[in-house]
Amino acid sequence: MGTKQVIVNDKPISVFINPNSSDYISLTDMVKAYDGGVKLIEKWLSTKSTVDFLGTWEILNNPNF
């Protein structure tokens, strides 16, 4: 897997490139520009709807889940 950066509003955002699968964008890089940005991710991960979404995604996309 390789890494590339894109610049959004003068801030570097890491993109993880996987030639055999999907690419991923770093959420932590995206929120670094905001005060309390990491707390946004913590709050998002703590909601029931997010946990349900992640579970459904894993069932659909990860045969070893």
Image (cartoon, grey):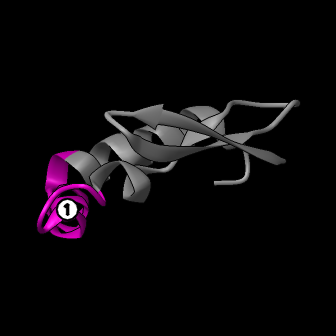
> Is 40 contained in the magenta span?
yes
> Is 37 contained in the magenta span?
yes
Dominant SS of magenta comes to helix
Residue 55 location, x and y as percent? Answer: 42, 48
Check disc 1 and give the amino acid type. Gly
Residue 20 location, x and y as percent? Answer: 87, 31
Residue 30 is left or right of residue 39, and the answer is right
- Under tag 1, what secondary structure? helix
Q: Which residue is located at x 28 percent, y 54 percent?
A: 31
Count of labels shown? 1
Residue 22 is left or right of residue 9, and the answer is right
Q: Quadrant location of the C terminus?
A: bottom right
Furthest residue to the front?
10
- Quarter residue 11 falls in: top left
**Vertical placement of residue 57 versus 28, above or below:** above
**Vertical placement of residue 43 versus 11, above or below:** below
Residue 17 location, x and y as percent? Answer: 75, 37
Residue 20 is left or right of residue 25, and the answer is right
Q: Which residue is located at x 80 percent, y 37 percent?
A: 18
| The one of 7 and 31 positioned closer to us in this rendering | 7
Q: Which residue is located at x 25 percent, y 60 percent?
A: 41
Packing grade of label 1 (10 A; few <14, some 14-19, many >=20) is: some
| The one of 23 and 29 positioned closer to us in this rendering | 29
Q: Which residue is mark 1?
A: 37
- Quarter residue 43 falls in: bottom left
**Vertical placement of residue 49 versus 19, above or below:** below
Boundaries of the magenta span:
32-49
